[in-house]
Image: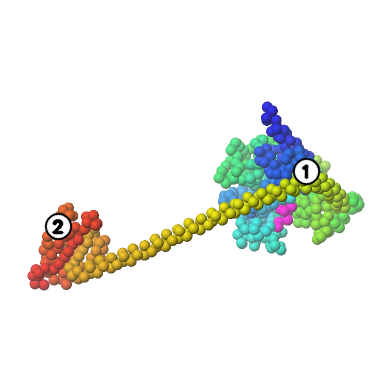
């Protein structure tokens, strides 16, 4: 038991560190697989040269920037446009037509990219729908939510700016159609950008986005343990409408959930939500404001004037949006700080820049309405040229007389001075702490300098020996290459000599055969013609290219070859030269002759024969 105590202490320290991350920054990693989570945390600890979890917690408390480095290590933000093209092709050709067919032309199409990282997946979905429906219909009907727990990745996603390397997977036509060059990077087209809503969302804790037609969550579930995965799938089942599609990553599947999801393509990890009568674990989407309440709010002009005066007297900027996403109210502070006017009242909130900058408010409004609670965003950064402002944003759902959410009030409290002052105090404190640590470590660094120098000298000596050894090996290799080159040159010369000898032999044999006046025909083992000399051409009138590789007994010329079958067979069987056989024939001129045919064995071809043909005396008048 004593030998395992250090491991138990390490596990306990890891859990304490995870609790600290949850309490300090709101990142709850308790549902993640401990093996991969511990491995990534230890990797970051090794990068900053920290040995124990307790020491690393002290470093996090002393250096707030270390949180971002740790979260970037834990949250592996690997994504690209149309990642895994085969899966996207299946989505476009098989899923999208069915999704569009089950919705009428006026129905809103709701899509959620959970774990969207820096936004490539969400924008890929927008491009896919725009190509399928056309840009105008996509702007009217499609709403895409992109969520993640990594605020830094979400900032990149909201900017919609990508490098040329990031857009490499896109065809040139799509890149030019949906992106505009902005300096060294490319910006996603603004009109389609307004249909994509980004927001921070923890799929293990936060209520899901509901009434979805398509939910994309690729290569995210695999980082969670079984219990967390079960809870997440429950949320996904609630989020999807009946017949809605769930698109997972290659390393994820739903093997034990056949009652709630049917498999559309196991290879591409696409599933369809089955119809279910089970009670949903969350409340339904908010009901739209009723006409009676709207009439009550706008019926008395005096009440409206008083309301506007009260709103303008508040110290914070405020904007109110109804349940349809239409701007109801804008107070004077909001008009001044965000460049809004009274003409913006009645416009869709999504058309205003304030809806997505400094933070994505549309998803927060929907979340606050859905969960019926007030949400707060602290220290949201807004840049206007070189000026930077910070706001605390309060998203507060407003209930009507029937208890249903009628509108949402959004207030912006300018905390720029306070935030900057806190940041300055924090920097000063960190500088002092750093200076103190540097003073403490100076002596230790001086003491280790000599050891490091000595170690460097030893390493240089070792490197020198390795270089000398490598040089000797290179010299040996060079000698072997030279020797191999000489052998190749010798072999090349031998091959050249042999080729010349073969050419001479072939020329000699051709000259011999040509000089023989008689016809010489060589037959191979299968009694096919292999050689047909000039004498045979003059005697029978057939050219070599007409007879070579043809069966001898199948040739039609003046010599009755069937009469030679017996002597040829005897020659093959006995292996001895036969006597000349006179055969009545007709030469190439049509004159009857007696042809003397003598058959000799051709041992070199294992059963072939050589036929010598000479013209005898005339057989009769020609």
Is 177 above or below relative to 86?
A: below
Above or below, 492 against 238 in this view is: below
Q: In the image, is residue 160 part of the stretch drawn in magenta?
A: yes
Q: Which residues are magenta?
A: 154-161
For the C terminus, which image quadrant?
bottom left
Residue in the picture at 66% in, 38% down:
35
Residue closer to the observer: 524 or 227: 524
Q: What secondary structure is found at the residue carrying circle 1?
A: helix
1 vs 2, front mark: 1
Evaluate whether residue 318 shows in this view: no
| Extreme-left residue of the structure | 620
Give how far across and how far down residue 509 sits, in percent: 25, 66
Q: Look at the image and tell me whether residue 119 can be seen.
A: yes
Is 202 on the left-hand or right-hand side of 576?
right
Question: Quick check: is 607 in the magenta stretch?
Answer: no
Q: Is 452 on the left or on the right of 474, as rendered?
A: right
Q: Classify mark 2: helix, strand or loop.
A: helix
Q: Earlier in the sequence, mark 1 or mark 2?
A: 1
Q: What residue is rendered at 11% in x and 63% in y? A: 582
Residue that mark 2 sits on: 567
The Cα–Cα distance between marks 1 and 2, rounded to whole angstroms, is 106 Å
Q: Are marks 1 and 2 in contact (CB under 8 Å)?
A: no
The residue positioned 20% from the left and 61% from the top of the image is 610
The x, y position of residue 238, in whole percent, is 68, 40
The residue labelled by disc 1 is 59
């Amino acid at each position: 038991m004593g030998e395992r105590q250090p491991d138990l202490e390490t596990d306990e320290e890891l859990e304490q560190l995870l609790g600290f991350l949850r309490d300090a920054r709101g990142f709850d990693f308790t549902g993640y697989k401990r093996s991969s989570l511990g491995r990534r945390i230890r990797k970051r600890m090794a990068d900053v040269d920290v040995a124990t979890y307790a020491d690393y917690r002290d470093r996090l408390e002393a250096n707030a920037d270390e949180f971002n480095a740790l979260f970037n290590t834990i949250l592996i933000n690997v994504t690209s446009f149309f990642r895994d093209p085969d899966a996207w092709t299946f989505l476009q050709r098989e899923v999208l037509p069915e999704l569009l067919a089950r919705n009428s032309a006026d129905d809103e199409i709701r899509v959620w990219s959970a774990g969207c990282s820096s936004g490539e997946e969400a924008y890929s979905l927008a491009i896919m729908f725009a190509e399928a429906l056309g840009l105008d219909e996509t702007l009217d009907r499609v709403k895409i939510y992109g969520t993640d727990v990594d605020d830094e990745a979400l900032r990149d996603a909201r900017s919609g700016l990508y490098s040329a390397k990031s857009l490499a997977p896109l065809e040139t036509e799509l890149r030019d159609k949906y992106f505009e060059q902005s300096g060294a990077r490319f910006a996603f087209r603004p009109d389609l950008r307004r249909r994509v809503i980004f927001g921070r969302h923890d799929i293990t804790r936060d209520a899901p986005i509901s009434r979805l037609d398509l939910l994309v969550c690729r290569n995210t579930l695999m980082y969670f343990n079984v219990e967390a995965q079960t809870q997440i799938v429950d949320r996904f089942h609630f989020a999807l409408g009946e017949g809605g599609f769930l698109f997972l990553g290659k390393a994820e599947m739903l093997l034990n959930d056949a009652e709630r999801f049917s498999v559309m393509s196991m290879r591409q990890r696409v599933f369809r939500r089955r119809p279910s009568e089970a009670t949903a674990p969350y409340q339904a989407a908010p009901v739209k404001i009723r006409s009676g309440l709207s009439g009550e709010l706008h019926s008395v002009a005096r009440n409206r004037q008083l309301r506007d005066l009260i709103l303008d007297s508040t110290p914070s900027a405020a904007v109110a949006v109804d349940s349809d996403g239409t701007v109801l109210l804008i107070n004077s502070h909001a008009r001044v700080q965000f460049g809004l006017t009274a003409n913006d009242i009645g416009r869709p909130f999504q058309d205003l820049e304030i809806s997505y900058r400094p933070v994505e408010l549309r998803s927060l409004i929907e979340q606050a309405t859905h969960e019926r609670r007030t949400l707060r965003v602290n220290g949201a950064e807004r840049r206007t040229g070189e000026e930077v402002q910070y706001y605390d944003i309060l998203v507060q759902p407003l209930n009507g007389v029937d208890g249903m959410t009628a509108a949402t009030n959004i207030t912006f409290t300018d905390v720029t001075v306070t935030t900057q002052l806190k940041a300055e105090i924090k920097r000063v404190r960190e500088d002092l702490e750093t200076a103190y640590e540097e003073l403490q470590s100076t002596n230790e660094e001086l003491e280790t300098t000599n050891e490091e120098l000595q170690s460097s000298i030893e390493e240089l000596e070792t490197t020198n020996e390795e270089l000398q050894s490598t040089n000797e090996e290179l010299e040996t290799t060079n000698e072997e290459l030279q020797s191999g080159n000489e052998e190749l040159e010798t072999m090349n010369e031998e091959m050249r000599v042999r080729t010349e000898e073969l050419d001479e032999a072939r020329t000699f044999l051709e000259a011999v055969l040509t000089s023989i006046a008689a016809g010489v025909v060589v037959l191979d083992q299968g009694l096919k013609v292999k050689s047909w000399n000039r004498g045979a051409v003059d005697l029978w009138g057939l050219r070599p290219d007409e007879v070579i590789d043809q069966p001898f007994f199948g040739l039609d010329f003046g010599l009755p070859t069937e009469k030679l079958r017996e002597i040829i067979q005897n020659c093959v069987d006995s292996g001895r030269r036969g006597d000349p056989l006179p055969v009545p024939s007709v030469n190439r001129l049509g004159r009857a002759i007696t042809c003397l045919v003598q058959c000799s064995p051709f041992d070199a071809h294992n059963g072939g024969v050589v036929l010598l043909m000479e013209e005898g005396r005339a057989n009769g008048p020609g």
